Amino acid sequence: MSRKSLVGKEVAEPDPIYRNRLVNMLVNRILRNGKKSLAYRILYKALGDVKQKTGKNPLFVLRQAIRKVAPDVAVKARRVGGSTYQVPVGIGSTQGKALAIRWLLGASKKRSGGSMSSGLGYELIDAARDSGNAVRKREETHKMAEANRAFAHLRQDHTPN
């Protein structure tokens, strides 16, 4: 396979009700065994809960939650001379959004009691208020990157071949 050609980025389609690509990205991450209608039902119920509990536009709360959870830096394992270092690497907005969605869904699955939709609703509200497990995960990632800042010179783009 040739490494010279670049692969175009795949843009997510907007969802049928909110006409928002972010909602569709979330649905595609919830998706299990190809049951997209169930994933839509879970997300729309969660957004309905958010609207009922906060009184705000659920899309606004969703955007705010993802903005607060998306990390700026992450650590990447890099082997140099037999030992592995955690090297801090900057993250683009698309990858940050993808990580934020993954962390929000993981935190909502770990919430005890209730259904996935209620857990996701509570997690979105908590993340928008700058609390909750997904935000804590981002803080841990930033702390780890800060602690390993000494290894920033080992980043791949700076090392000679």
Image (cartoon, rainbow, N blue to C red):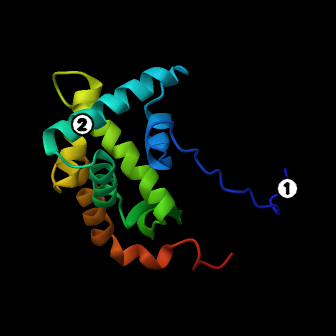
Which is nearer the eye, 56 or 98? 56
Q: How many marks?
A: 2
Where does residue 138 sit, x and y in percent of width and height?
28, 57
Q: Is residue 103 left or right of residue 36?
A: left
Outermost residue to the right: 2
The three-letter amino acid code for the residue at tag 2 is: Gly
The three-letter amino acid code for the residue at tag 1 is: Ser
Q: Is residue 11 left or right of residue 107?
A: right
Q: Which residue is mark 2?
A: 121
> Residue 76, located in which quarter of the rendered image?
bottom left
Q: Residue at x 19, y 21 (%)?
A: 114
**Would you place residue 23 above or below residue 109 in this image?**
below
**Would you place residue 21 above or below residue 68 in this image?**
above
Neighbour tally class for label 2: few under 14, some 14-19, many 20 plus, Cα within 10 Å: many
Does residue 12 appear anywhere in the picture?
yes
Say which label, 1 or 2, has the lower sequence index: 1
Which is nearer the eye, 75 or 21? 21
Q: Is residue 110 left or right of residue 8?
A: left
Q: Judging from the image, what secondary structure is the residue with disc 2 in?
A: helix
User: Label 1 to label 2, Cα distance in Å?
Assistant: 44 Å
Q: Which residue is mark 1?
A: 2
Neighbour tally class for label 1: few under 14, some 14-19, many 20 plus, Cα within 10 Å: few
> Residue 34, located in which quarter of the rendered image?
top right
Residue 14: mark in rendering = none
Q: Judging from the image, what secondary structure is the residue with disc 1 in?
A: loop
Where does residue 24 sit, x and y in percent of width and height?
49, 41
